[in-house]
Each structure stands twice: as C-alpha cells, then as structure tokens.
Image: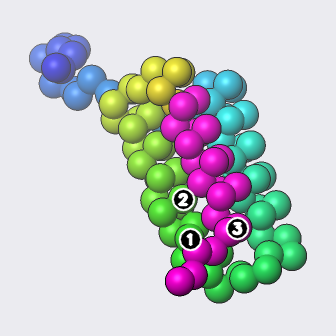
Amino acid sequence: MTNVIEGDLKPNRLPLSLTPYRALLLCIVLLALGVRWIDAPWPEELRLKHIPTAIGIGLLLWGHHRLGISDTSFTLIIVFILLHIIGAQWIYKI
C-alpha cells in the first residue's frame, strides 16, 4: 500500500517511535536483563542463554516498526521474554 503525495510514491510505514506504554515495557525488560547479570552464578552460560533474548528483543522492535503489532501482542511478547530472563538462571545439565 502506498500513499500518493503530489505524484510521488512513498511507502506507507509506521513511525519508529514507541508509545510511552511500550517504552516502559521495554525498559522493564532491559532492567530485568541487567539485574540478572548481577552476581550471576554462571556468567558464561548466562551470556549464551541471552543471545535468543537479544534476538527476541530485536525482532520485537522490528515487528513494532514493520508490522504494527497490537499492544496486547507487544505485552504478551514482553511477558514471554521476561519469563525467559527469569528462567535462564537455571542450567540443565545431564
């Protein structure tokens, strides 16, 4: 879908800025991620476990910008990422 303004075709994209609600949720995730690094029992393994977290946050921001996901979807993805951050402290070894 495109917008036609004075004969110029411009793509119809959403603004990159976050709403205050989404910015607050993102700050909570980043704060939780930082707090988990304080006195971590296995920092090497924790680093590996949070690679998917960083990818998930990047995909969330991409989805916000490109797909225009709803506040409900954004919130549920944030909850999932927070659960991953909390659960990443336990390491399963056989």
Residue to which mark 2 is pinned: 53
Q: Quadrant of residue 89?
A: bottom right
Q: Residue at x 41, y 26 (%)?
A: 69
Q: Nearer the viewer, mark 3 or mark 1?
A: 3
Evaluate whether residue 22 shows in this view: yes
Q: Amino acid at mark 1?
A: Lys
Q: Is residue 63 above or below residue 47?
A: above
Q: Looking at the image, which is closer to me, 55 or 3?
A: 55
Q: Are marks 1 and 2 in contact (CB under 8 Å)?
A: yes
Is 81 within the magenta? yes
- The disc placed on residue 89 is 3
Q: Looking at the image, which is closer to me, 45 or 14?
A: 45
Q: Amino acid at mark 3?
A: Gln
Label 2 residue SS? helix
Which segment is the magenta one? 75-94
Nearest to N terminus: mark 2 or mark 3: 2
- Quote the CA–CA distance across marks 2 and 3: 13 Å
- Quote the CA–CA distance across marks 3 and 1: 9 Å
- Total residue callouts: 3
Q: Quadrant of residue 27?
A: top right
Q: Amino acid at mark 2?
A: Thr
Q: Residue at x 62, y 81 (%)?
A: 45
Residue to which mark 1 is pinned: 49
Q: Nearer the viewer, mark 2 or mark 3?
A: 3
Is 9 placed left or right of 17 in the picture? left
Is 82 within the magenta? yes
